[in-house]
Amino acid sequence: MLVSLIASTCLAPVLEPVWRTDGLDAPESVIADGAGGFIVSNVNGEGAEANGAGYLARLDAQGRRIGPERWVTGLNAPKGLALSGGRLFVADIDTLVEIDPERGEVVARYPIEGAGFLNDVAAHEGRVLVSDSARSRIHVLEDGEVSLWLEDAALAGVNGLLPEDDRLLVTAMSNGEVLAIDWQTRAVTPLTGGLQNADGIAPAAPGGYMLSQWPGDLWHWVEGEAPVHLVERQDPPVLMNDLTVHGELVIIPHWQPGAVSAWRLSCSDGSG
């Protein structure tokens, strides 16, 4: 993931629309594919519905559909995505699915015993982490084996995962918080609150982050300060899920109306 060059002292973050792609089916997560485009997970049903209709789609840098409209199929309700070691990993209700992105084919499935609602996925130093929003847990896939990495009451509704050098940042929907987890001690520290249903988290600048809040809010947050509310899109409903930042663009999937949008994030001096 590339980080934009917005100063962490940004006083008045501004979002400008760049492109939008419609015709998707309950898109939940989007990541950069490493080749200039994007991969989008499409639940194509209810969030916990094991209907076999979920799929992944691909977009180019301008948001245009590329390749087969349903690039990877045979999923249930795919959500979070991450690339690691040349493989693509996706959270699929109670299973972590491994995909060969060169062939667009599922190569392995890792069922997670007792999983309730697997949500986001992140990669860190060869490990793949996946959040379970229904169980206050984070699991890890390492050397082909899945194990419980952390279970903590503070992780109620755990959703977004963002690995950093010395810590893992997570969003917790139940308490509306951003939390930091120390890699070594696994101690959990609240960093900010005041959100409702905190969802995605992505770096927007050194010291700054973009936060999404279900069902339709977007925030910019600098650690040590209160989050700045940028967008509310609930009337009409434009439901925001996870997000990613690629260069100066913020890429957001919208469960409804079935779209992915790109926004340019910049700063004003706050005088307007």
Image (cartoon, helix red, strand yellow):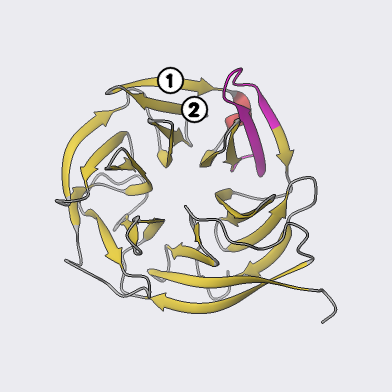
Picture coordinates of residue 125 (x, y %)?
Answer: 43, 31
- The amino acid type, in three-letter code, at marker 2 is Arg
Relative image position of residue 117 (x, y in whole percent): 40, 37
Residue at 73% over, 44% down: 193
Q: Residue furthest right?
A: 271
Q: Residue shown at 19%/59% (left/top)?
A: 71
Say the numbered circle drawn on residue 189. Answer: none
Q: Toward which corner of the image does residue 28 lie, by quadrant? A: bottom left
Q: Secondary structure at mark 1?
A: strand
Q: Are marks 2 and 1 in contact (CB under 8 Å)?
A: yes
Residue, disc 1: 148
Q: Label 2: how many residues lie within 10 Å, few (<14), some (14-19) or many (20+)?
A: many
> Relative to residue 234, is residue 239 drawn left or right?
left
Residue 79 within the segment the image draws in magenta: no
* Residue 58, position as x, y percentages in the image: 28, 63
* Position in image of residue 224 (x %, y %): 79, 45
Residue type marked 1: Leu
How far apart are the two marked residues, 2 and 1, measured between alpha carbons? 7 Å
Label located before the other in sequence (2 or 1): 2
Residue 175 located within the stretch drawn in magenta: yes
> In the figure, is residue 252 to the left or right of 179?
left
**Mark 1 burial class by Cα count in 10 Å: few <14, some 14-19, many 20+:** some
Q: Secondary structure at mark 2?
A: strand
Disc on res. 137: 2
Horizontal side, residue 14 vs residue 93: left or right: right
Tell me the residue at 47%/52% (across/down). Answer: 1
Q: Who is closer to the viewer here, 140 or 73?
A: 140
Q: Is 243 situated above or below 152? A: below
Magenta residues (range): 173-189
Is the residue 173 above or below the residue 72 in the image? above
